[in-house]
Amino acid sequence: MAEAAESPGDRETVSPRPLFAGLSDISISQDIPIEGEITIPMRSRSREFDSSTLNESVRNTIMRDLKAVGKKFMYVLYPRKSNTLLRDWDLWGPLILCVTLALMLQRGSMDGEKDGGPQFAEVFVIVWFGAVTITLNSKLLGGNISFFQSLCVLGYCILPLTLAMLICRLVLLAEPGPVNFMVRLFVVIVMFAWSIAASTAFLADSQPPNRKALAVYPVFLFYFVISWMILTFTPQ
Amino acid sequence: MAAVDNLQFEEFGDAPTCLAANPEDTTISIEDPGETPKHLPGPARGSGREEDDELLGNDDSDKTELLAGQKKSSPFWTFEYYQTFFDVDTYQVFDRIKGSLLPIPGKNFVRLYIRSNPDLYGPFWICATLVFAIAISGNLSNFLIHLGEKTYHYVPEFRKVSIAATVIYAYAWLVPLALWGFLMWRNSKVMNIVSYSFLEIVCVYGYSLFIYIPTAILWIIPQKAVRWILVLIALGISGSVLAMTFWPAVREDNRRVSMATIVTIVMLHMLLSVGCLAYFFDAPEMDHLLTSTATSNQTVGAAKFS
């Protein structure tokens, strides 16, 4: 190949020449044109796409985000091996769930003197700092999941426990008693198991195999504490 | 090279055939590396060496100690530096927990289980579990004790979680810090054979708190005698693990100083457990007595009025 780059007049000689011998004879002369244009054919289309989301109505934007959140809720309720939750992570869903849970767990300010249940800020802090701690723990153990993906999964898997809170609040409207308590206990246990199953289905694959139990135990503790807060909720 | 079309790829064949064709060509040969180095024989497990092995740890402790010096080389502001403290597998954590539950005289917890790989996973999550175990068990036990009373309104007592967390994490980190400082100070005066790093001390303290998790759950039983027996059992087990770990570190010192150190360690441990029992768990029979006398006084007062 190097021999072909040399002056084409040498083609008729059959004797092999040493490689790269005539390279110093080459000069880029003015008769080889090296100007032109570079065009990216997709560019105009992407610019059109950008301006289209900027100009669309607010309702469309919100509906698109809500649909994404709703789709992820479905993935949590019926956990399958899928990467959607991990690939397109977002933190809207965890925020909605955390705020809903904290609002429902709050009891009002009349029993501020007594040592009551958790306040809104306490629930919020427990959920978010608990999720951050578990994520840091799994990353330190050598897991290959990103920080926000893990926060997203842990936040979305609170959904069964939020549903349990709703059901408990409805059950508490009936008369109190041991039957009431047994129903609430059963619902909380079922939803707790569902949360753990959903989150391990998403998170377990990202851990090294000999440390899976070490990474899953803090998730168990986290949802256990939230379940305890839900179960011990008593209206005044 | 033969005179072939210069743009075609050539098959060169084996090294021997090329050399046979053109003796002054140069060829490269790469041999399979697995065959030539001989397998190093594993360390001999003679019966006479077993005692040494047990005291010093397993047979690959030499290798791990050689490698340990090369481990922590990242600067402290990188993430990899902190990853070296979580370099444990599941079975290692279980082994360490088992070692803290079964103190065997003559076996040093640090030498046997930690062996220059102290981890922060165990201390951190055992303390977290203990915080919630104490808070939840205290809440449950109070609920069960006051179950029949009319005036009792159940509250989840969520504030106590933060108090428990402060106490337990302070104990698990400040006491090792003080102990490490004290041991360093004594090391400068008296030459000790055994010295522990700060993380190893934190590790021992963290794993020694594991026994309190089932103890806290069993403290729900509202019998005073049962609770105090549990305190003694837990203190015996974890106190002996701590004492056996730190005795070699102060052995060469002045007799009084070493005894005082060991006694202080055990006393602080006992203070923690008794304090948790007293603060988070209401006394079972006394409250019944108080409320029953209170209600009887009320009925007597009501009878006097009417």
Image (cartoon, rainbow, N blue to C red):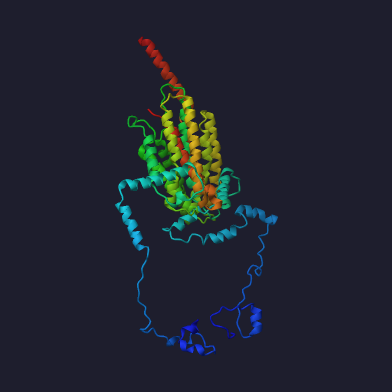
Q: In which quarter of the view is residue B301 placed?
A: top left
Residue B135 percent coordinates (x, y): 45, 36
- Residue under the image location 46 percent in, 58 percent down: B80
Lateral position of residue A54 relative to residue B103, left or right: left
Q: Is residue A11 positioned above or below A50 on the image?
A: below
Residue B148 percent coordinates (x, y): 46, 22
- The mark total stands at 0
- Residue under the image location 43 percent in, 19 percent down: B293
Of the pair B235 and A105, the residue shown nearer to us: A105
Q: Is residue A8 positioned above or below B224 on the image?
A: below
- Residue under the image location 40 percent in, 16 percent down: B297
Residue B220 percent coordinates (x, y): 50, 31
Inspect this view and state whether residue B256 appears. Answer: no
| Residue at the extreme top of the image, as rendered | B306
Of the pair A198 and B75, the residue shown nearer to us: A198
Q: Is residue A17 positioned above or below A197 on the image?
A: below
Of the pair A184 and B203, the residue shown nearer to us: A184
Q: Quadrant of the C terminus of chain A?
A: top left
- Residue under the image location 54 percent in, 82 percent down: B6
Q: Is residue A111 positioned above or below A3 on the image?
A: above
Residue B264 percent coordinates (x, y): 48, 43
Inspect this view and state whether residue A56 appears. Answer: yes
